[in-house]
Structure formats: structure tokens, C-alpha cells
Amino acid sequence: MNLNDVFIVRSHRVPLKLVLGLMEDADSPEETKSWALSALFHASYTHDDSLRDYLYDALDRKGLHPYSEDRLEEGVQQEEKSPEELQAAQAVFQSQLKTILDDLMQLKAEDGKPLFGQKNHWWAVYRIFVDRNIAKIRENHYQAFIHLINTLNLNQLNAELDLSTLSNITQDPIFRLPFKKWVKPWGESTRRQNAYDRMHQIAEELLTSLIKANLCKSH
């Protein structure tokens, strides 16, 4: 984190040190979040994980969240935002997704190897994104999902994501269903059951992280 970084805020060139100071001294939650979103956009643009983590911690200390207060119940009209605010909110959202998937890639299985390690493990990620409408990913919209993952620039990619592997999810009688309808294939080979356990754990870990980050609701 370089406090001397300068970037554009509200059409003015402002050093990061000043933005963080204004965020800390803000008199209202709205003003606090406004400065924080500007800094988070800069953190996303520069891939500055230390700045992003600092901002999340600072907001948490104030009892705020960069995204949760903008989430609205059905039927409630959203307050109109400026293009800059929308861009900053999108940057925050993508930064959160990147963190969650980076953490997923770091998880270990019981054998000490990465939990996520095969191409078809992307099925679990895709399934949860579709089920919970993450980034508006819909059923059979494989290219949109691939594009989203590519734009996140993950720090580590344990398995390649490609269209042919992803689209083969439609051939699987279990994983093509919504996550809550997955049923372990009892009576089939041990290899098949172990593969199911691994896929289920990946999906469950991802879903838990998304809920904790307030990117989707628990139901």
C-alpha cells in the first residue's frame, strides 16, 4: 500500500493518504463509504490486496460494509447512483469475488493437495454462481461465466477453465442440478463417491464464503 499514490476522486487528483484520512474522519456512514469506495476502486485497479484488506477492516470497525447497505429487498427501488459510484461498486464486487476464489484455490484436501485441482471442479463454482445469481450468471451462459473469471485475474489458477469442460456439466445427472438437489451416488464406485464429496465440499466452501461476504443470502 503506497500512501503517496494519486488517483482521481470526484474529478480531482487526490493522494491515497488524504482519502484514507477523510474516510476515517467522516461524520456519517454515507460519507465514510463514499471515500472507502473510491479507495477500493483504486485497490482493485492496482491489485493492491493490502489496501483492500485495510479498507475492509476499517469499514468493519465502523460497523459498515461496502456492499451490504446497497442490497435491497425485492420491490424496493434503488437510489440512483452516479456512473462513478456504479463503477466503484462493481470494482468492490469483483474484488470480493477475486478474494473468495483466490482463497478457494488455497484450500487443501485431507491428502494435503489442493481441494480444487481439476477442470471439472469449475462445475461447482458455476453451479453456485447460477443458483445464487452471482454476477447475473444464468443457466447455460458458459461464455459469460468464463469471461467473468478471466476478468478477475486470480492469483492462482489450479485448473484451466475452458468451454468444453464447463459445458459437459449438462451430461452429469448430479451436478447439472441446483446444489440443494445434489444427492450422493450411493451404490456407485468409491471413485465416483469420492469425486462427489470433493465437488460438494468445493461448492459448500464457496457458498459459505459468498454468504459471509454478503454477496448472497442464506436460504
Image: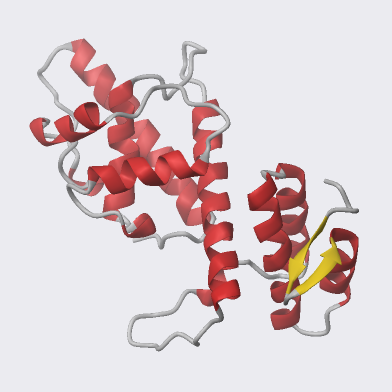
Would residue 163 be seen by someone viewing this image from the given angle? yes
Q: Which residue appears at 70% of the width and 56% of the height?
A: 42
Query: Between residues 91 and 75, which one lies in front from this camera angle?
Result: 91
Looking at the figure, which quarter contains the C terminus?
A: bottom left
* Image quadrant in which you'd find residue 85: bottom right
**Foreground residue among 101 and 16:** 16
Q: Residue at x 24, y 43 (%)?
A: 142
Instruction: Give the x, y percent position of residue 66.
Output: 62, 66
Residue 111 image point, x, y percent? 47, 11
Q: Is residue 14 left or right of residue 97?
A: right
- Measured as percent of width and height from the top left, residue 125 is found at 35, 39
Q: Is residue 126 above or below residue 193?
A: below
Residue pictured at 37% horizontal, 32% vertical = 201
Q: Nearer the viewer, residue 136 or 211?
A: 136
Residue 67 seen in render: no
Q: How is the image coloured?
A: secondary structure
**Is residue 43 placed above or below 146 in the rendered structure?**
below
Compared across the picture, whether 1 is left or right of 99 comes to right
Q: Is residue 158 left or right of residue 31?
A: left
Residue 156 at what x, y percent from top left?
Answer: 54, 27
Question: How many numbered marks, from 0 up?
Answer: 0
- The foreground one among 43 and 8 is 8
